[in-house]
Image (tube, rainbow, N blue to C red):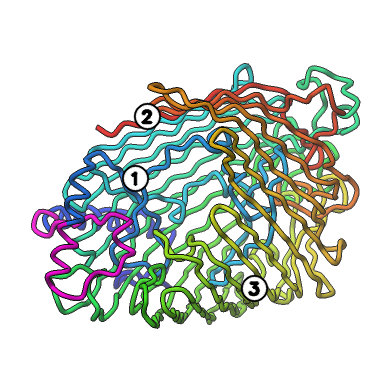
C-alpha cells in the first residue's frame, strides 16, 4: 500500500499508466502556473561572486548591492549559468558558468571522473582510481549497477538559467573502429526565472571481438523555476535511459591474446556468441521548496531574519532488466528454466517522497558570524520487485535530522543521522527493513571562495557509521542460471573515517573503512558464482593525491596517484598503486585560439581484479587471474577556437612496443591502438 499525493495505491503496476498521466498533467499545469507567476514575480539572477558576500545591513546598502548586481548582469548578455541541486540547498542557487576550458577535454569517458569502483568499470577499459564512497543516507537498495556511470540521473542533471538560448553539440568518433557518440543540449528561459531544457545522448560501439558491441540512449527533458529572491524554487523533469550490451563473457583463453597469436580479434574465441543484456529506465522527478521571511522586498542573501524553508521531493523510477542467451555450452553450470535458452526478465518500480524543513541552506556559509542550522524530515520509499516466479513489495520510512554550525565563516561542523522502519514482504513472508546511518564532519576553510561549501578549499575530517540491509540481489535471485533464497544474511556494518585536503588545485584524500559482515559475490568457476559474507571484520584503506598544475603558462601537468590496501584478500582485492598522469604543452594562437599537445599515462600494479558475470550483471571476487602491471599511453591534441573545442587522440600507442598483457577485467582485453576525434560546439544565441 502506498500513499502518493493523497492517493492510496494497492497495486502500483496496474495503476502505473494512471499515475504517470496524472503526474504529467500535474507537471504541465504547474509549468503553466509558473509561467504566469514569472510574468509578475521576476527572478533577480544573482552573480556567483555576489551571492557569497554578506550584504550591508542598511536598506541603502542593500539597494546599492542590488544595483551593482544588475549592472554586472547587464554587462554580460550571453552568460549561460547552471547549478546542480545540492541537498538542503533551497534558496537562490549558487550558479556557475559553463566550463569551456581545454584541460582534460580529451577524456570523454565519464568513468574517469567517478569514485565508486564497482559502478564505473566499463568492460575492457583501464582501471580507475578506486575507493570507498559510502552514502550514509538510508535507502532501499536492490543492487549495484555496473553501468551507472553513463546513465542520466537527477543528481548529475545541471539546471540552467540562460540570458539567451543555449545549445551544445558534442560528437566523438573512433576512426576506423565504428564508435560514435553524440550529445545535444538545448536550454532557454521561456520567461524570467523559468528555464526549460532537453538533453539527448547516444553511444554506439561495434566492438572488436565477437558479440562485444553495445549501444545506449539517454534523454532528459526538465526545467527549473526561481521566483524573485528565491522564495519559491521548483525543479521537475523526465529521464529515460536505455542500453543494450552484447555479452560475450570475455575471451576463452587470455593466453591467445597475450601471445598475440591471432591478429584478427574477431577470430579469437569468446565464451558466449548469442547473449545480450537489455536495460531500460524511466524516471520522473519533482522537487520544490518555499522560503519564509518577513521582508518581501529583500532577497534571501540579504535577509538576516530567515524563518527557514519547507521542501518536498518526489521521485518515480521504473527499471527493467532482461538477459537473453541461446546456447551457452559449458559456460554456465545450470539451466533451471531451460537447457537451451534463457530469457530472464526483472521489473521494479520505486516511489520516493521526502518532506523536510531546514532553517537555512546547508551549502552556503555566511562570513564573519556564528551560525547554526537545523534540518529534519522524513522520507518514504516504496519498491515493487518482480521476476519470473515471485513478487516482492518493500515499504520503509526514513526519519532524518541534520545540524550544522559555523564559526566566523571558517570552521564548520556538520552532523547527520537517520534510521528506517519498514517491512519487506515476499511470497507470503516478511522481513523488517533495518537501516542505521550517520556521520559527523569537521571542516576548516582556508579562505572565502565562491560556490558550495563542499567545493571550497579546506581540510576536513569525516567519521561515520552505517548498518544497512544487504542489497536485495543477495537475498533473492531466480533466473535460468542462478537461484537462491536467503533471508538469514546479517546486516553489513561500516565504520568509516575520511580525511580531505584541498588547496589551490591540490587535493589529498584518505579513506579508512572497517567492515563487518561484508557481503559480496565469489567466483567459483567459469560462469558460476555464490553469495558470500565476510566471517571476520577487516580493513580497507585508500590514499589519493592529485593536482592540476600549469608551469610558466606553457606546460600543464594533471596528476592522480593512489595507494590502496585491504587487510583480508579473501574478501576484497585492490591494486597497491594506481596512476593517471597527463603532461601537455600549451601553445597560444593569438587571434585564433589555444592549442594543447600532450600525453596521458595509465598504470596500476597487478592484482586479482573482480570478474564480470554477464547473467548476474555483477562483478565477483576471484583469485585465479591477475591483471595489471602494464602501461597505457595515449597521445592527444586539444584545440580551442572561439566557441568550439576539438580533440584528436591516439589510444594505446605502445601496442607492439610492450607485451600484450593489457587486460584489466579478466578475459576482457583493452582496446587495441585506435584514433579518436571529438568536438563540442556551443551556441549562445
Residue corresponding to mark 3: 469
Residue 657 at what x, y percent from top left?
Answer: 84, 23
Residue 468 at what x, y percent from top left?
Answer: 63, 74
Look at the numbered disc 1 and give the secondary structure of its residue. Answer: strand
Is any part of residue 486 visible from this angle?
yes
The residue under the point 55% across, 23% down is: 677
In which quadrant of the rendered image does the N terminus lie? bottom left
The residue under the point 48% across, 33% down is: 202
- The Cα atoms of the two marked residues, 3 and 2, are separated by 49 Å
Residue 603 at what x, y percent from top left?
Answer: 77, 41
The residue under the point 36% across, 32% down is: 682
- The Cα atoms of the two marked residues, 3 and 1, are separated by 34 Å
Above or below — where is 135 with respect to 37? below
Q: Is residue 40 magenta?
A: yes
The residue mark sitting in front, 2 or 1, is: 2
Look at the numbered disc 2 and give the secondary structure of its residue. Answer: loop
Which of the marked residues, 2 or 1, is nearer the chain's N terminus? 1
* Of residues 345 and 389, the one drawn nearer to the viewer in this rendering: 345
Amino acid at each position: 500500500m502506498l500513499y502518493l499525493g493523497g492517493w492510496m495505491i494497492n497495486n502500483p503496476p496496474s495503476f502505473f499508466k494512471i499515475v504517470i498521466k496524472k503526474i504529467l498533467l500535474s507537471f504541465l499545469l504547474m509549468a503553466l502556473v509558473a509561467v504566469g507567476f514569472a510574468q509578475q514575480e521576476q527572478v533577480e539572477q544573482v552573480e556567483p561572486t555576489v551571492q557569497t558576500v554578506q550584504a550591508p545591513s542598511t536598506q541603502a546598502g542593500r539597494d546599492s548591492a542590488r544595483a551593482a548586481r544588475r549592472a554586472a548582469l547587464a554587462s554580460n548578455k550571453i552568460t549561460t549559468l547552471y547549478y546542480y541541486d545540492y541537498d538542503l540547498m533551497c534558496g537562490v542557487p549558487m550558479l556557475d558558468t559553463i566550463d569551456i576550458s581545454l584541460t582534460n577535454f580529451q577524456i570523454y569517458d565519464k568513468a574517469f571522473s567517478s569514485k565508486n569502483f564497482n559502478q564505473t568499470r566499463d568492460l575492457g577499459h583501464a582501471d580507475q582510481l578506486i575507493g570507498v564512497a559510502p552514502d550514509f543516507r538510508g535507502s532501499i537498495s536492490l543492487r549495484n549497477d555496473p553501468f551507472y556511470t553513463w546513465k542520466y540521473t537527477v543528481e548529475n542533471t545541471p539546471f540552467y538559467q540562460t540570458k539567451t538560448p543555449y545549445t551544445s553539440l558534442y560528437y566523438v568518433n573512433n576512426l576506423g573502429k565504428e564508435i560514435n557518440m553524440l550529445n545535444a543540449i538545448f536550454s532557454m528561459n521561456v520567461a524570467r526565472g523559468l528555464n526549460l531544457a532537453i538533453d539527448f545522448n547516444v553511444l554506439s560501439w561495434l566492438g572488436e571481438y565477437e558479440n562485444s558491441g553495445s549501444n545506449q540512449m539517454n534523454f532528459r527533458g526538465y526545467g527549473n523555476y526561481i521566483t524573485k529572491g528565491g522564495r519559491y524554487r521548483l525543479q521537475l523533469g523526465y529521464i529515460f535511459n536505455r542500453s543494450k550490451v552484447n555479452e560475450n563473457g570475455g575471451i576463452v583463453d587470455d593466453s591467445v591474446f597475450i601471445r598475440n597469436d591471432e591478429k584478427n580479434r574477431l577470430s579469437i574465441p569468446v565464451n558466449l556468441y548469442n547473449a545480450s543484456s537489455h536495460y531500460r529506465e524511466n524516471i520522473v522527478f519533482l522537487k520544490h521548496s518555499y522560503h519564509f521571511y518577513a521582508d518581501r522586498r529583500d532577497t534571501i542573501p540579504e535577509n538576516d531574519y530567515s524563518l527557514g524553508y519547507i521542501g518536498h521531493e518526489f521521485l518515480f523510477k521504473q527499471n527493467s532488466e532482461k538477459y537473453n542467451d541461446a546456447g551457452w555450452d559449458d559456460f554456465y553450470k545450470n539451466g533451471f528454466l531451460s537447457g537451451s535458452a534463457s530469457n530472464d526478465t526483472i521489473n521494479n518500480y520505486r516511489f520516493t517522497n521526502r518532506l523536510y524543513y531546514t532553517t537555512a541552506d546547508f551549502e552556503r556559509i555566511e562570513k564573519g558570524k556564528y551560525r547554526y542550522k537545523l534540518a529534519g524530515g522524513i522520507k518514504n520509499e516504496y519498491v515493487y520487485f518482480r521476476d519470473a516466479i515471485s513478487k516482492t513489495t518493500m515499504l520503509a520510512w526514513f526519519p532524518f535530522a541534520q545540524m550544522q554550525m559555523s564559526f566566523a565563516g571558517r570552521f564548520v561542523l556538520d552532523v547527520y543521522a537517520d534510521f528506517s522502519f519498514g517491512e519487506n514482504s515476499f511470497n507470503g513472508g516478511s522481513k523488517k527493513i533495518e537501516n542505521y546511518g550517520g556521520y559527523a564532519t569537521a571542516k576548516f576553510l582556508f579562505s572565502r571562495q565562491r560556490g558550495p561549501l563542499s567545493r571550497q578549499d579546506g581540510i576536513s575530517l569525516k567519521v561515520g557509521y552505517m548498518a544497512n540491509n544487504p542489497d536485495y540481489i543477495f537475498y533473492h535471485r531466480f533466473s535460468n542460471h542462478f537461484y537462491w533464497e536467503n533471508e538469514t544474511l546479517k546486516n553489513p556494518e561500516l565504520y568509516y573515517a575520511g580525511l580531505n585536503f584541498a588547496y589551490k588545485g591540490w587535493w589529498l584524500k584518505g579513506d579508512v573503512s572497517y567492515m563487518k559482515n561484508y557481503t559480496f559475490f565469489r567466483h567459483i568457476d567459469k560462469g558460476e558464482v555464490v553469495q558470500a559474507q565476510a566471517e571476520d571484520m577487516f580493513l580497507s584503506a585508500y590514499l589519493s593525491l592529485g593536482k592540476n598544475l600549469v608551469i610558466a603558462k606553457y606546460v600543464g601537468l594533471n596528476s592522480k596517484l593512489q595507494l590502496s590496501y585491504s587487510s583480508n584478500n579473501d574478501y576484497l582485492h585492490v591494486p597497491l598503486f594506481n596512476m593517471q598522469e597527463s603532461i601537455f604543452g600549451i601553445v597560444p594562437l593569438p587571434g585564433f585560439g589555444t592549442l594543447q599537445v600532450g600525453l596521458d599515462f595509465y598504470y596500476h600494479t597487478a592484482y586479482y581484479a573482480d570478474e564480470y558475470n554477464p547473467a548476474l550483471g555483477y562483478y565477483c571476487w576471484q583469485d585465479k587471474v591477475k591483471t595489471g602491471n602494464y602501461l597505457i599511453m595515449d597521445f592527444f591534441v586539444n584545440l580551442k577556437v572561439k566557441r568550439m573545442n576539438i580533440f584528436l587522440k591516439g589510444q594505446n600507442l605502445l601496442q607492439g612496443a610492450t607485451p600484450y598483457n593489457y587486460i584489466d577485467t579478466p578475459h576482457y582485453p583493452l582496446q587495441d591502438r585506435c584514433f579518436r576525434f571529438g568536438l563540442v560546439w556551443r551556441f549562445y544565441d
